[in-house]
Amino acid sequence: MESKLEKIREQVTDCKKCDLWKTRTNAVPGKGNFHSDVVFIGEAPGRSEDNKGEPFIGAAGKKLSLALETAGIKREEVYITNVVKCRPPNNRIPNVEERKICRDYLEKEISIIKPKIICILGNTAFNSLLGGSEITKFRGKTIQREGQIYFLTIHPAATIYNQELISVLKKDMINLFELIKAIKNNETIRIDIESHS
């Protein structure tokens, strides 16, 4: 399992399938515990991530770590990745083509880890994976599609500009890990949206 993820890391690091490789410093493959029950998926790397080649290590990453700690979880216990593995210039939102090209890497990461839940962080990931929008309206909800359960929450970056959202993110993390515990105990959990498309 680890060697399969290592292979994807190498493919991501060497990737030149779209033009983002021309402006990146480093590609940013996913990182974390490959036995994790949850995979966190964000939008794309920012400046700090591009510099170091690691996901969620900048300001937004610190907010995510803080929210995880509220739920009694260390970030080393989970797996964190992004829809797009290279930083778009000026932190713009990755376009449809970039997301489509990177999709293969994301699907491979998910198929290797086989998480009980995928936690979607923010609008871009919501749109890319489930075709959704308005994450603030759907945050805290669970969606099931093709047997996979997704949990929706805001992107940690949103809490940098709106301090009130920190408590929202913390609350969602507590609920997320309660859900995971219930799944592991074979308890019936509430699915808010059943989606087949």
Image: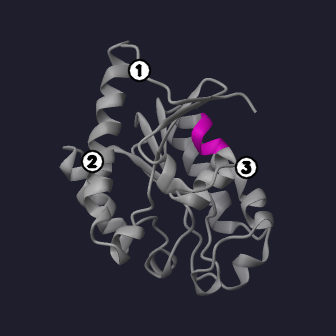
Quadrant (top left, top right, bottom left, bottom right) of the C terminus: top right
- The residue positioned 45% from the left and 61% from the top of the image is 155
Above or below, 51 relative to 117: below
* Residue type indicated by callout 1: Ile
Q: Closer to the N terminus: mark 3 or mark 1?
A: 3
Q: Secondary structure at mark 1?
A: loop
Query: Label 1: few (<14), some or many (≥20) within 10 Å?
Result: few
Highlighted magenta segment, given as a residue range:
107-111
Residue indicated by mark 2? 171
Please tell me whether the stretch drawn in magenta is mainly helix, strand or loop.
Answer: helix
- The residue positioned 23% from the left and 60% from the top of the image is 66
Residue indicated by mark 3? 104
Distance Cα–Cα, label 3 vs label 1: 30 Å
Residue 192: x and y in percent read 50, 30
Residue 96: x and y in percent read 77, 64
* Residue type indicated by callout 3: Asp
Instruction: Tell us which disc is closer to us: 3 or 2.
Output: 2
For residue 29, say whether it is visible.
yes
- The residue positioned 31% from the left and 50% from the top of the image is 76
Q: Secondary structure at mark 2?
A: helix
Q: Magenta includes 109?
A: yes
CB under 8 Å between discs 1 and 2: no
CB under 8 Å between discs 3 and 1: no
* Residue type indicated by callout 2: Lys
Residue indicated by mark 1? 189
